[in-house]
Image (cartoon, helix red, strand yellow):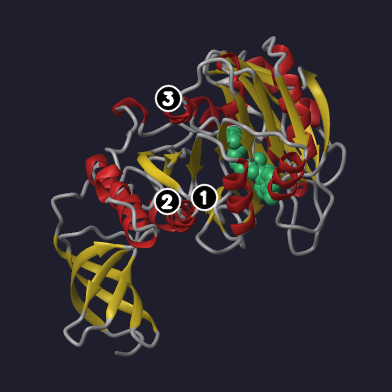
């Protein structure tokens, strides 16, 4: 097979990151994005490796029955919604299988323990995100572009209406675009590290309908800023906070550390699991509130607290999971590595009148070891690590602390599978796993798993 060959391919499977998979007669596997199982298509080969190739669709010859027309203007370029061309049922089937395959193949868990995925309601498959970070740039014709970075690049795929974002974000973006189109010299140039305006960053507290507008600036202010802020305030009564986030670094990292409040409050508020949370520009918060709530409720059910337990919440972020269970335990200990998140967690506890919680800023593995040495014996431990999962050492320490139950919240089925295997070697058995779709249309899937001491 050579680059630029065109071959006819039957799509028979999907990869974990949402590419279709076809197999040539000679056994070569070809990965083709934006396809669906059941498609027959002509594919142009883009890249040839030893036993596999990457291709793109030239023409669909026969359409899979899972297909729908993607409504989005940039779905094949932006790379966010890898399943936008599929019916949602098909997407859920793929995600269910992704979790099932990972935990049964890698984790050797009995497949019957994987429950049916908790999908989003029909009305929440789109427009569920409460946060958007929109890059602003000029294209080679000098025209203003706002949208999303294309797959694996720093080129902007222009998009005026992201279907994952609420309508109010689309409207505010349009007002913002009018402003930068009037003063294009204000736009930041990544290569030259010149200009001012880098990103528009929006957040909404869905329950309160409060909106935060944050402009990420290479500096502390920009010319004509009052004109922009006044027009936003005039047009959108939902906007309760306008902030300049200062980011003068030559970096891909979107947000800087300093925030200057130019209008209203320094944080907006939202309600999650009957608790209020303050969303400052840098505070971590789940982007899909409704599905996060379902995930946390499942975690709470698995934690099965009665009121007299010590609960440990490792990788606690701003404390959301532990705090949602704090009323049902004697003591809550949260651990998180980012000090700002710990500050938020303490504040969240205080604002909700929770007095039995303490939060430790530390690496989870180190904190667990230290707490174990201090003789702390949690009854239930919740973990919610980033994609890379837990360390072997941490799993050993958790097992030595001897909790009755471990509730593992995971954003990566593969590392979940790997870690479950180690838990089982440490006399913890997997009782149940529930996948939850927190990110409809994208390749991501969360799971929550209950482990019990044998
Ligand atoms: N449980 C929270 C946050 C989960 S995201 C929620 O549901 O909102 C994972 C968190 O782990 C992040 O806040 C990240 O800062 C934190 N983290 C990453 N590495 C860590 C480590 N080694 N030790 C402790 N926390 C860590």
Question: Residue at coordinates 59% horizontally, 58% vertically from top-left?
Answer: 392
Report, in whole angstroms, how far the alpha carbon at label 1 lies from the one at label 3: 43 Å
- Residue 74's mark? 2
Please state which of residues 405 and 58 is positioned toward the viewer in this rendering.
405
Quarter of the view holding residue 446: top left
Which one is in front, 340 or 402? 402
| Residue 259 at least partly seen | yes
Front residue of 1/270: it is: 270
In x, y percent, where is residue 92? 28, 43
Instruction: Identify the element where label 2 is drawn.
Output: loop
Q: Which residue is mark 3?
A: 301
Which residue matches tag 1?
158
In percent of width and height, residue 177 lies at 62, 38
Task: Provide the secondary structure element on which disc 1 rests.
Answer: strand
Q: Do callouts 1 and 3 mark residues in contact (Cβ within 8 Å)?
A: no
Spatial distance from mark 2 to mark 3, Cα to Cα? Answer: 40 Å
- Residue 310: name its quadrant: top right
2 and 1 marks in contact (CB < 8 Å): yes
Task: Using residue 431 as the reference point, say whether residue 257 is left or right of it.
Answer: right
**Image quarter in which the C terminus is found:** top left
Which one is in front in this view, the residue at disc 2 or the one at disc 3? 3
Between 74 and 333, the one nearer to me in the picture: 333
Examine the rendered structure and indicate whether residue 287 appears above or below residue 365.
Answer: above
Picture coordinates of residue 161 (x, y %)? 47, 38
Alpha-carbon distance for marks 2 and 1? Answer: 7 Å
Q: Residues within 10 Å of mark 3 (few under 14, many from 20)?
A: few
Horizontal arrangement in the rendering, residue 377 relative to residue 292 (left or right): right
Quarter of the image where the N terminus is located: bottom left
Q: Residues within 10 Å of mark 1 (few under 14, many from 20)?
A: many
| Tag nearer the camera, 1 or 3 | 3
């Amino acid at each position: 097979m050579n680059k630029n060959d065109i071959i006819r391919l039957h799509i028979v499977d999907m990869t974990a990151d949402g590419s279709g998979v076809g197999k040539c007669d000679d056994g070569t596997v070809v990965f083709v994005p934006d396809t669906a199982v059941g498609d027959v298509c002509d594919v142009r080969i883009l890249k040839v490796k030893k036993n596999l190739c990457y291709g793109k669709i030239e023409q669909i010859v026969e359409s899979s029955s899972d297909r729908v027309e993607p409504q989005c203007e940039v779905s094949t370029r932006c790379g966010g919604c890898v399943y936008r061309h599929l019916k949602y049922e098909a997407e859920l089937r793929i995600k269910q299988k992704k979790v099932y395959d990972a935990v049964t193949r890698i984790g050797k868990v009995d497949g019957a323990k994987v429950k049916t995925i908790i999908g989003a309601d029909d009305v929440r498959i789109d427009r569920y995100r409460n946060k958007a970070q929109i890059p602003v740039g000029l294209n080679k014709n000098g025209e203003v572009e706002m949208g999303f970075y294309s797959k694996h690049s720093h080129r902007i795929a222009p998009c005026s209406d992201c279907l994952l974002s609420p309508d109010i974000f689309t409207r505010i973006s349009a007002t913002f675009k009018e402003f930068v189109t009037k003063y294009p010299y204000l736009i930041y140039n990544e290569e030259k590290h010149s200009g001012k305006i880098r990103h528009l960053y929006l957040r909404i507290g869905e329950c309160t309908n409060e909106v935060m507008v944050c402009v990420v600036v290479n500096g502390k202010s920009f010319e004509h800023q009052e004109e922009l802020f006044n027009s936003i305030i005039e047009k959108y009564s939902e906007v309760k906070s306008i902030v300049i986030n200062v980011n003068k670094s030559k970096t891909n990292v979107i947000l800087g550390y300093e925030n200057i409040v130019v209008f209203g409050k320094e944080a907006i508020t939202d309600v999650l699991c009957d608790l209020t949370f303050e969303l400052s520009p840098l505070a971590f918060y789940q982007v899909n509130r409704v599905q996060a709530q379902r995930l946390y409720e499942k975690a709470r059910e698995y934690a099965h607290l009665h009121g007299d337990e010590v609960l440990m919440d490792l990788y606690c972020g701003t404390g959301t999971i532990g705090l949602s269970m704090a009323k049902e335990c004697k003591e809550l200990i949260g651990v998180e590595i980012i000090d700002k998140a710990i500050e938020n967690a303490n504040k969240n506890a205080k604002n909700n009148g929770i007095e039995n919680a303490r939060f430790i800023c530390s690496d989870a593995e180190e904190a667990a070891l230290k707490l174990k040495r201090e003789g702390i014996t949690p009854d239930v431990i919740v973990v919610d690590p980033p994609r890379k999962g837990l360390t072997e050492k941490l799993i050993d320490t958790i097992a030595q602390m001897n909790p009755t139950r471990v509730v593992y919240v995971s954003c990566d089925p593969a590392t979940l599978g790997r870690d479950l295997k180690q838990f089982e070697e440490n006399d913890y058995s997997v009782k149940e796993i529930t996948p939850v779709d927190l990110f409809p249309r994208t390749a991501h899937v969360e799971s929550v798993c209950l482990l019990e001491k044998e």
